Image: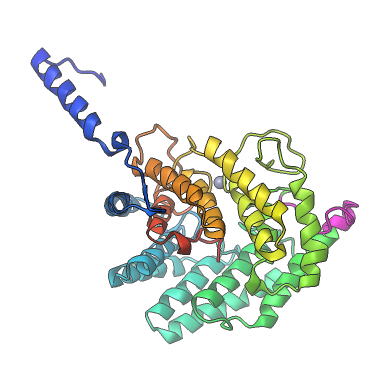
Amino acid sequence: MDPFPRMPAQLLYSKCLFIFVYLLFSPSVLHINPLHHCQVSEAFQKRVQNKIKDLLQQMEEGLKTADPNDFSTYTGWTGIALLYLQLHRVTGEESHLQRALDHMKRALRNLNGRRVTFLCGDAGPLAVGAVTHHRLNNKAESQECITKLLQLQRSVLSPDSDLPDELLYGRAGYLFALLYVNKEIAPNTVDETTVAKVVTAILESGKNLSKDEKKSDRCPLLYEWHRKQYVGAAHGLAGIYFMLMQPSAKVNQEILNELVRPSMDYVRHKKFRSGNYPSSLSNETDRLVHWCHGAPGVVHMLVMAHKVFKEEKYLKDAVECSDVIWQRGLLRKGYGICHGTAGNGYAFMSLYKLTQEKKYLYRACKFAEWCLDYGTHGCRIPDRPYSLFEGMAGAIHFLSDLAQPEASCFPAFEL
Ligand SMILES: [Zn+2]
């Protein structure tokens, strides 16, 4: 079809005038300072709230043609339910909780027993199902989800399983599910012994590979996925160390000092001059700046390391991550949280929570501002355009966190 059908001069003129007036007043051209007295300004909050409503409508419409069987947090119904739980937390509106339940039910009908993680396996729907039912006071249903969640530990702990350890498909992704339930329901919903067993399995696996690769003195906890030693949050070392340092994982201080800290320092030495990190230990191209590969994922590990070990060097590296993300973090891959602008925005939120420095909140707001013009930058459209990790639901999640930046939380990752 001809994209420029001929039109009468009069019509063309009025059309041009309309476009000119539109551009003059369109939000992206107005450039409101999103901050006011070190807080997100009311005017900007209002724009964000309006956009959330608009995007939610688009998302619900788009989901009508989404894969009915994809139950996952990463691309499927559990991710959508998690977004509604977030909206319920932020706004207190009961309708969001009901919506979360609707999507959860759909997810729970489709479990397949193939994977064990929060993001891509059965543990995600079971953990989010337990939390949703708990909030609705459906005690029996919540408990049923937890029982099934605990049954998955058999394959996680089995010494002869070939399960990896990373977040998307491995043990760290199961550990997250347990810690999530303990945070959202009550601290001992999953008992300490179970958490400790999963932690031990992760530590043993890391020690074994390190020994095999003769790196015990330099990097005592080493992990791989598909025979590659990835660095980033999704498949790599940063995501695993980040989980091991969670206070609720209760890894003892000696292990943190002797195993986790030197391993992190080994990864820190792989940092590029730009402040970014390679996607794997053997990769030397400074290309990807995503949560899944690069500084936007590694920054969370560094912020946590600073909290745990109180050493300035971790904060300094985290600040460098923030700078490289600020320079290169608006992504053509879109607005999502795995490899999109919203995910990179969470890096600034993390530094803001740690330092309370206005600069980081400003940067988060500017990335949010980019997301407000959703779909207008010619970005690539992801395979699952409405999902939590690839698409619109993730961007909405990020935008909704601007209402209370101190309580912001990268879904399925931060606790
Ligand atoms: Zn990604």
Q: Which residues are magenta?
A: 209-225
Front residue of 135 and 360: 360
Rendered view: 302 above or below 152: above
* Residue at (34% x, 40% y) in the render: 373
Image position of 175 (left or right of 409): right
Name of the residue lying farthest toward the left: 10
Residue 259 x/y as whole percent: 81, 63
Q: Mark yes or no: residue 272 visible.
A: yes
Above or below — where is 276 with respect to 159?
A: above
Q: Is residue 232 visible?
A: no
How far from the left and from the top, in percent, is residue 359?
A: 49, 47
Q: Check the image and name the residue furthest to the front.
A: 37
Q: Quadrant of the C terminus?
A: bottom right
User: Nearest the camera: 74 or 264?
Assistant: 264
Quadrant placement of the N terminus: top left
Quadrant location of residue 134?
bottom left
Q: Main secondary structure of the magenta part?
A: loop
Residue 330 on image: x %, y %? 48, 38
Q: Position of residue 184 (x, y in %)?
A: 49, 75
At horizontal 23% and vertical 18% (from top left) the residue drawn is 4
Is residue 223 toward the left or the right of residue 412 in the image? right
Colour logic: rainbow
In-image side of 91 versus 218 (left or right): left
Q: How many marks?
A: 0
